[in-house]
Image (cartoon, grey):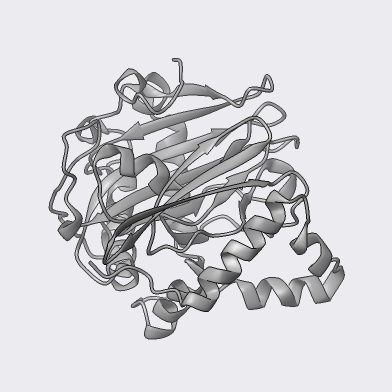
């Protein structure tokens, strides 16, 4: 296992922020009362950002940014003609329409999700299996990965619901995956802005911890189980996220965010007249095999394809090899067809 290393000082800073939030002190709001270009400079400092160009290879600088921040943005990961193919495949697919289910955010708004266990051989599956995606994940995580699952999140105009604050690993740990050697690749099919519910990243629990997170009405509870030589020590932190200022990650079509499974994130409701569709593929380290059988693959081997396969692919319709998830099989979500 090669988890992201976070210094004791940084871990202490995380705890200080979370404990201050628990005491209804808003340190981020105090510190970040910033506007205009100054705020933009702060976001630039906080966000490791790179541009895609072919041929593409993840660099040591990307790895350092990921280790420090828990995520990196790669602008233009899908080029315009590739993006057009992928978007058309999702829009026209009867497989997506028949396997999509709704998730309610508790406020009367809903988002639609379709989730699958295998990448498949259609153009969307070739994106997941492409060198630019898989090799980047392997560079950032420090080892061979397999496909855990993929999904498309569809927030329609005016009605799309929010996704509450959570860490992906909070759910995946309950699937028998013992270490947070996991990553998600978030690809924007539509421009993602504040008004249509773009990604937001908040306080991050140290990625070298095992964490379980649960949403409550106004608070987010993080149970961090720190692995110590002498055994396990449990730390419970309650903190309010109602008034915290966090960056809105403005991503254009084709941009991708690679983020670690312990990054704490959310996205708000879509109150705009524009939809927000996002394609997400999730990967696990091969060395991090799940200890229990569950609704996603416990292990696997990826058939990686060259980047040009996306552009050359002619299969935009046959998604029969994806093995779509029936939401009834996932006890961690409340969903309906």
- Residue 166 appears in the figure: no
The quadrant of the image that shows the C terminus is top left
The quadrant of the image that shows the N terminus is bottom left
Q: How many numbered discs, if any?
A: 0
**Left/right of residue 31 with respect to residue 154 in the rendered view:** right
In the picture as drawn, the residue positioned furthest to the bottom comes out as 60
Identify whether 153 is placed above or below 280: above
Identify whether 285 is placed above or below 61: above
Please tell me which residue lies in front, 278 or 216. 216
Where residue 304 sits, quadrant-wise, is: bottom left
In the picture as drawn, the residue positioned furthest to the front comes out as 230
Identify whether 160 is placed above or below 89: above
Which residue sits at x=51%, y=57%?
254
**Left/right of residue 25 with respect to residue 11 in the rendered view:** right
**Left/right of residue 183 with respect to residue 217 in the rendered view:** left
- Residue 135 appears in the figure: yes
* Residue 210: % across, % down: 36, 54
* Residue 82: % across, % down: 42, 56
Where residue 311 sits, quadrant-wise, is: bottom left
Which residue sits at x=30%, y=73%?
139
* Residue 61: % across, % down: 43, 84
Please tell me which residue lies in front, 320 or 233. 233
Which residue sits at x=28%, y=55%?
179
Please tell me which residue lies in front, 276 or 147. 147
* Residue 39: % across, % down: 79, 71
């Amino acid at each position: 296992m090669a988890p992201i290393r976070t210094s004791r000082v940084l871990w202490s800073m995380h705890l200080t922020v979370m404990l201050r939030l628990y005491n209804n002190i808003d340190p981020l709001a105090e510190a970040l009362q910033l506007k205009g270009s100054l705020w933009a400079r702060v976001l630039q400092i906080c966000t490791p950002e790179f541009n895609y160009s072919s041929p593409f290879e993840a660099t040591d600088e990307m790895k350092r940014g990921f280790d420090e921040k828990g995520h990196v943005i790669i602008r233009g990961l899908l080029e315009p003609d590739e993006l057009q193919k992928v978007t058309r495949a999702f829009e026209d697919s009867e497989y997506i329409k028949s396997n999509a289910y709704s998730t309610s955010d508790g406020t009367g708004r809903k988002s639609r999700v379709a989730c699958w266990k295998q990448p498949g051989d259609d153009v969307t599956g070739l994106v997941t299996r492409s060198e630019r995606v898989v090799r980047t994940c392997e560079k950032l995580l420090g080892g061979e990965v397999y496909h855990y699952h993929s999904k498309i999140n569809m927030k329609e105009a005016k009605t799309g619901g929010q996704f509450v604050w959570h860490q992906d690993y909070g759910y995946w740990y309950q699937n028998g995956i013992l270490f947070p050697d996991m990553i998600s690749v978030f690809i924007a099919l539509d421009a993602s802005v504040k008004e249509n519910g773009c990604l937001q990243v908040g306080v991050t629990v140290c990625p070298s911890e095992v964490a379980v997170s649960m949403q409550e009405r106004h608070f987010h509870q993080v149970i961090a189980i720190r692995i110590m030589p002498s055994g396990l020590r449990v730390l419970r932190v309650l903190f309010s996220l109602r008034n915290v200022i966090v960056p809105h990650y403005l991503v254009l079509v084709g941009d991708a965010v690679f983020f670690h499974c312990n990054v704490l994130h959310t996205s708000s409701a879509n109150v705009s007249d524009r939809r927000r569709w996002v394609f997400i593929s999730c990967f696990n380290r091969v060395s991090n095999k799940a200890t229990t059988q569950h609704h996603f693959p416990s292990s696997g081997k990826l058939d990686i394809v060259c980047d040009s396969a996306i552009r050359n692919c002619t299969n935009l319709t046959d998604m029969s090899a994806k093995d779509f998830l029936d939401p009834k099989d996932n006890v961690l979500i409340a969903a309906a067809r």
